[in-house]
Image: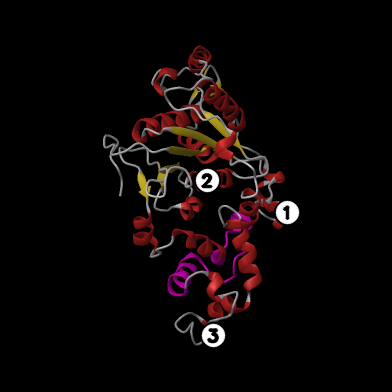
Amino acid sequence: MPIKPEIRTRRCNLLLVDGEHAAYRSYYVFPNMSYNGKPTGLIFGFLNLFRTALRRYNPFITVICWGGKRKDLFRRELSSVYKASRDSEEPPVGLYEQIDDLKLIIDRLGFVQIRGERLEADDVIAILSMQASFKGSASNPWEVYILSGDKDLLQLVSSNVKVIAPTGKEEDEIYTVKRIKEEYGLSDPTLLADVAALAGDRGDGVEGIRGIGGKTALKLIQDYGSIFTWVGEHKLSMDDLDGLPNRVAKRSVEICDKVFSSWDLVKLPPPWLKEKMWHEERSILDQFKFATSRERSSVNLEAAIRMFIDCGFNKISATDFG
């Protein structure tokens, strides 16, 4: 259920911002904004969105997450076509230049940024949200909010992890376990990865099973649960899948290799990364010195103010960020 900005029943322990999604969203929301011939719409849109989230959810710790270069991603080792269709695309004019300036402003405001060298922003968010879940106590775990409109992240929703999809209005969309159940008919949000594995995503180069779209994939998971309980073990016969088109049922049972290959690409965090993560001596959370919104030691407010002036911003100020 959407939460009005003035209602603060508690402050979240950790706010994870999907930097890339917010940056791309802002670029297209403010495509014509510029100052002295320099495009600034992405920077303005991101900072306005970020400021609103800080005021609305009052986080104790904030981290902006970025991904690595597409050609260097670990997923390319699993599938050479993963997001390969985008390699030949020319980046939108001014996009990367604005992102570079934005990152510099965020640094000068004193907020932590984490970039996954061979990971996507989704992976960084998944790792941090999982490790944060072990902070606090069993009865009072850390409350984690993920700020992103990317529905791939909905599989991370749990009792203490919520996904906040910004709307630009007075109310954001808040995805909780209850809402996932109401909207998708799944009591376990992690099963959204299974849905994505079956349906695939042509744009991202995730094959899935030909002939199965999103609606059919969701029905399969609603009716039969995780793909690991029926696709891999062939526990369901054609009779068990009665009611689905024969071609769909047949491909669901027989083509399990493609399903699991797709699952490896869409699961957050990826199983191969998760195994490596648990063998690290210290978690990512412990490796970084997180600063609260009230005591960010690396703040260079004077430099941040100069950058805001250089961008011609008069509706948003560097002092708005604490």
Image side of residue 184 versus residue 195, left or right: left
Relative height, residue 91 to residue 178 (above, below): above
Give the CA distance from mark 2 to mark 3: 39 Å
Q: Which residue is mark 2?
A: 131
Name which residue lies at 60% across and 35% down.
287
Q: Is residue 199 magenta?
A: yes
Q: Earlier in the sequence, mark 2 or mark 3?
A: 2
Q: Earlier in the sequence, mark 1 or mark 3?
A: 1
Name the quarter where the C terminus is drawn: top left
Relative height, residue 245 to residue 258 (above, below): below
**Other residues around mark 3 within 10 Å, as few (<14) / some (14–19) / many (≥20):** few
- Where residue 206 appears, x then y in whole percent? 62, 59
Q: Earlier in the sequence, mark 2 or mark 1?
A: 1
Q: Which residue is mark 3?
A: 237
Q: Which residue is mark 1?
A: 77
Give the CA distance from mark 2 to mark 1: 25 Å
Q: In the structure shown, which secondary structural element does the residue marked by tag 2 occupy?
A: helix
- Where residue 307 appears, x then y in whole percent? 52, 17
Mark nearer the viewer, 2 or 1: 2
Q: Amino acid at mark 2?
A: Gln
**Other residues around mark 2 within 10 Å, as few (<14) / some (14–19) / many (≥20):** some
Q: Which disc is residue 316 wearing?
A: none
Magenta stretch, residue numbers: 198-224
Q: Amino acid at mark 1?
A: Glu
Name which residue lies at 35% across and 30% down.
55
